[in-house]
Image (spheres, rainbow, N blue to C red):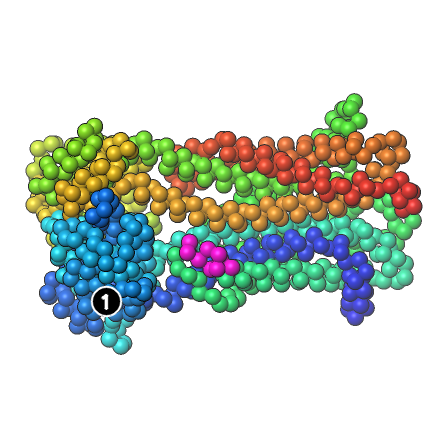
Amino acid sequence: MTNAWRLAVRDLRAGGRGLWLLLVCLFLGTAALAGIGSLSSSITAALDAQSRRLLGGDLELRVSQRRPTVEESAAFASYGRTSESVAVNTMAQTRARGASTLINLRAVDERWPLIGRLELLPGALASRPRGRNIAIAPALAERLNLKVGDQVRIGASWMRIMGVIATEPDTLGFSFGPTALVDMAGLDATQVIQPGSLYQSRTRILLRPGLDPDRTGEALVRRYPSAGWAARTPQDAAGNVKRSIDQLGQFLLLVGLAALAIAGIGIGSGVSAYLERKGRMIATLKVLGARSGTIAAVFLLQIGLVAGIGIAAGLALGAAVPWIVGTLAGSALPIPPQLSFYPAPLLVAAGLSLLVALLFSLPALARARAIPAASLLRDKVSVARRPTIAVLLAMAILLAALVALAVLTASDRAIALGFVAATGALVVLLWLLGAGLRWLLARLPRPRRPLMRLALANLHRPGAQTDRLVVALGLGFSLFVALAAINTSLSNELASTAPAKAPRFFAIDVQPEDEPTFRSAVRRAAPTATIEAVPSLRGSIVALKGQRVSDMKTLPEGAWILRGDRTITWSATVPPRNEVVDGKWWPADYRGPPLISLEDRAAELLGLKVGDSVTVAVLGVEIPARIAALRKVDWQGLGLNFALIFSPGYIEEAPHSLLASVYAPATRDGAVATGVAEALPSVTMLRTGDVIGQVSELLGRIALAIRAAAAVTVAAGIVVLVGAVTASGQARRYDTVVLKLLGGSRRQLLAGQAIEYALLAFLLAMVAFLLGTLAGWYVVTAVLELHWAPDWLAIAGTLAASIVTTLGIGVASSLPALRATPASGLRSG
């Protein structure tokens, strides 16, 4: 090994530049995996470290449409120090021009916050709001052009802005509008909470030492089984955010694996080209008595050194990604990342990269090891040998280790295994396509045009890199086409379907006695408006077929309807956009025992059918009911739809409000919002476009992250393209010299190269179109369950960019070969 090490280092110093492709490919693949893993770990660590602050205590108990009773408050306080808050969506209106917007009004008691502190921007009139004073989020101040000292109308009261919020505890989560903070007296002054209003009360507890949050929460929920309380611990505080981060991180890691697979193609090309140039050196060493094992050790050490440098550089960049993203795009993240060193994702990235480097380098090493000493005399006619059984077995072991590491370290192993299997199948398919293309071109009749004949010959000649290029670039461009199809389908769904079917507003907390006033206010602002109004209140499913949900060890997978409470309604007839698919709807004059209708997919998730019993808790009262019908619901229209609908009768006695949808011309949005705010200040007008805008913004951030990861994939493909041209550089220079001696001009030779890469790029575009649109269709229709509505112009633009990129880089990389002079070719020969 001493001699092998000395020879490896000496040769690297003299001619190690040939391994640059190995270095760059490993750097790109490692950096993608390490960066995605480090960023995901940093955000997850921040959520874990600040979970108590995000929750606002050790335990949170929440209930809808009511506040805790005296008995419940005393029971909560027996476990530790408590604080109560109330959250409700309502409208804020200014004196100037009557501008209004939706806000998230939060009322807190004197003990809030139990953890952390409220910080206001300089210039605040007090440390916290009291009475008719209010603190507002910077987004609200900017939206309504407000400053400290101004007044804003909330509900029935004009409130004075006493400060702008700089830091607010326990605010992680989705809300429809910016925060406005008041105390309990301020909430009473606004009169926004009326019987049946939709609001949420939260009691946070700092538990006494020794009490377990999970067990305490379960005990309190069981103590009041029909009260509708739901318990959350610090581990649950950022549960949805963590799940989203994990899912997005998992998807990006899979994209990173695709980049690493493409990089592997480049590694194979680069190592093969490097070792082919070392053929005379290998033969010379064998003539001097070197054994095949020593020669293999020399080049294995070289590859290991270069791979180590590439992996180390990629790990360094990947470890710095949380700092880079936190600096450049920290505001787009749900929480600032916790800047630290995370070894786990770095070790996984290093392991995967090393296995890929070994897997794709092994065939070239085996061929180099088998080069005979006699090739010094006849290297031009030596035939490449197929891998031996031992080499194939070693490659199978490396491949199994690679798949095992990728799957076992994934958060969702089933998805990771499916992705790895699909990627493997796609690589094999593309490889076969590339090999088939070479076979077909070699057997086609030769074109009469010299340039076309030259271009086709370059694609199927011995040593051509066509099959590897088809795999690498086909995989990368297919990914971009799939992303374009997914993104444009989402955009078209939101931009065309929603405005065509969706109402302009949802009105929340309309009191039944105020319905005529509400309709009059809307009609004055928009005479052609259509209004749908239904009763609404909040309820939660507490038992299925006689078994209490709280007693279930595990909830059915995807059973979203059991998590927390839901908005429910009742109806004598089948609502619009609903279709009964099983069972029978009750008569319009039905007044018997409570019946319900469930959305069909929710019933399938819960394993329910017509005739089964379901118990729903509404305002602390348990209502047992029997399933009479299952419905298919058109959720995409964004109209008034409910997963759970009761029959009229008993439930109508519960205090409730009306939920209304307003279909009006878009040009009357401002007039409708202002008219309702002036007539009924306690009614909340939720603009559908604002909701769609928030969803679109979220999807845009996700798409940006996916594009960033996919860019690494395409960068790897570009490097593979450059490397493949470089790998065949010696043969291309030889051909160029011969053609120049035969009278070929540089312009003709360049045109031949352009035709070659144009044909290859066109083939890749067709492959990417077929595979990418198929993958995009599956994601949109099967995963997202949306209509397939891609923008074919955007996809065509993606394909055009792919063709131009391939053509430009291929031709540019061929320029060194075109500069070769006949004299240099004769001297080298």
Image coords of residue 787 (percent x, y)? 39, 34
Q: Residue at x 41, y 42 (%)?
A: 783
Which of these two is toward me, 539 or 201?
Answer: 201
Residue 332 left/right relative to 404: left
Dot 1: what SS?
loop
Instruction: Report the label total.
Output: 1
Residue 409 left/right relative to 161: right
Image coords of residue 277 (percent x, y)? 81, 51
In the rendered image of this protein, does residue 617 appear above or below residue 114? Answer: above
Image coords of residue 792 (percent x, y)? 49, 31
In the rendered image of this protein, does residue 372 appear above or below residue 109? Answer: above
Q: Most extreme residue toward the bottom, as rendered?
A: 209
Give the magenta-colored segment's residue range. Answer: 324-332
* Residue holding disc 1: 126
In the rendered image of this protein, does residue 634 appear above or below residue 161? Answer: above
Which of these two is toward me, 251 or 480?
Answer: 480
> Mark 1 is on which residue type?
Ala
Circle 1 Cα neighbour tier, 10 Å, few/some/many (<14 / 14–19 / ≥20) = few
Q: Main secondary structure of the magenta part?
A: helix
Image coords of residue 224 (percent x, y)? 15, 61
Question: Would residue 319 be seen by someone viewing this image from the given angle?
Answer: yes
Q: Residue at x 16, y 38 (%)?
A: 534
